[in-house]
Amino acid sequence: GFFYNSILHAMQISLISPIKNDIDNLTKHPLFERFEIQPEKILFSKFPNGFKGLLRIIIGQQISFKTADILWLRACNLAYGEENITPEWVLNQNSLILKSIGLSNQKQAYVRKLAESITLGEFDSSHIDNLKDEYIIEKISKLYGFGIWSAQMYCMLCLARPNILPQNDLAVNKTLQSLYGTGHTLDYKQILQKTKKFEGAYSAFTLILWYLYIKKVI
């Protein structure tokens, strides 16, 4: 039968310039150099643009990276390939099919509303990709089921924008707590203050924090 392997097909976000260059530089920074991180080990898939990317982000909300990859793979296999995942395809699936992918009732409502918004012309994902980060975040965060974090994920993982530091990201917060020894959760304003020296390369900074979190090295 058909089997789509996302690992073989996926471009790694960490190999796209300028993010790749930023990772190479940041792994040598005093904050990270003690971990002796090999930049080529920081592997996170680049998501597709447009509807597919937005759908992939909904799938990944509040679950682990690994689980999200598995669920996306299921969706791709059900559609006989990532290229067949369209708003129309989603709207043609019943709730049992979407549940078999691993989507909760709430996430099913999100993906159906997203698909409807695009098919009805209420939201045009093809026109946002050339906007500045803040405008993209503003537009996507207004979609049903999306917020600031999800909109930031679109900028970073779908568009490879180099300066995204996600809000309310568990892995980012936990890793920064350990790195800075704060002993408590940092709010976004505190995170921005502590990490200002990395501004301009926040996406690479985030990928390194995720890597450290997953590897449980701190």
Image (cartoon, grey):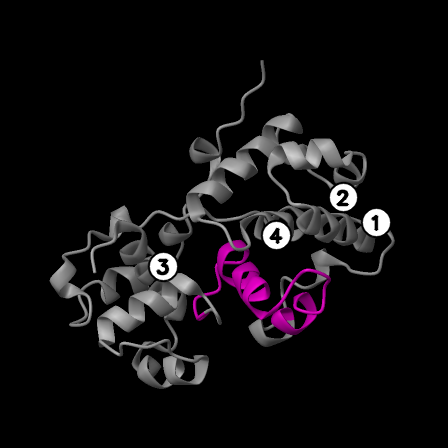
The answer to whether residue 15 is left or right of residue 169 is left
- In the picture of the structure, the residue carrying the numbered disc 3 is 207
Number of other residues with Cα within 10 Å of mark 2, as a class: few under 14, some 14 to 19, many 20 or more: many
Q: Position of residue 44 (x, y in %)?
A: 40, 48
- In the picture of the structure, the residue carrying the numbered disc 4 is 58
Mark on residue 119?
1
Q: Which of the 4 quarters of the picture holds residue 155?
A: bottom right
Task: Give the residues drawn in magenta, as a range.
Answer: 136-165
Q: Amino acid at mark 4?
A: Ile
Q: In this view of the protein, can residue 29 be seen by the observer?
A: yes
Pointer 2 or 3: first along the chain: 2
Q: Residue at x 69, y 51 (%)?
A: 106
In space, the residues marked 4 and 1 are separated at their CA atoms by 18 Å
In space, the residues marked 1 and 3 are separated at their CA atoms by 33 Å
Q: Amino acid at mark 1?
A: Thr
- In the picture of the structure, the residue carrying the numbered disc 2 is 87
Pointer 1 or 3: first along the chain: 1
Q: Position of residue 124 (x, y in %)?
A: 76, 59
Quadrant of the snapshot with the N terminus: top right
* Helix, strand or loop status at disc 2: helix
Pointer 3 or 4: first along the chain: 4
Is there a contact, CB below 8 Å, between mark 2 and mark 1? yes
Q: Which of the 4 quarters of the picture holds residue 200?
A: bottom left
Q: Amino acid at mark 2?
A: Pro
* Helix, strand or loop status at disc 3: helix
In space, the residues marked 2 and 1 are separated at their CA atoms by 7 Å
Q: Is residue 71 above or below residue 177?
A: above
Residue 49 lies in magenta, yes or no?
Answer: no
* Helix, strand or loop status at disc 1: helix
Q: Amino acid at mark 3?
A: Leu
The residue nearer to you, when weighing 200 against 140, is 140
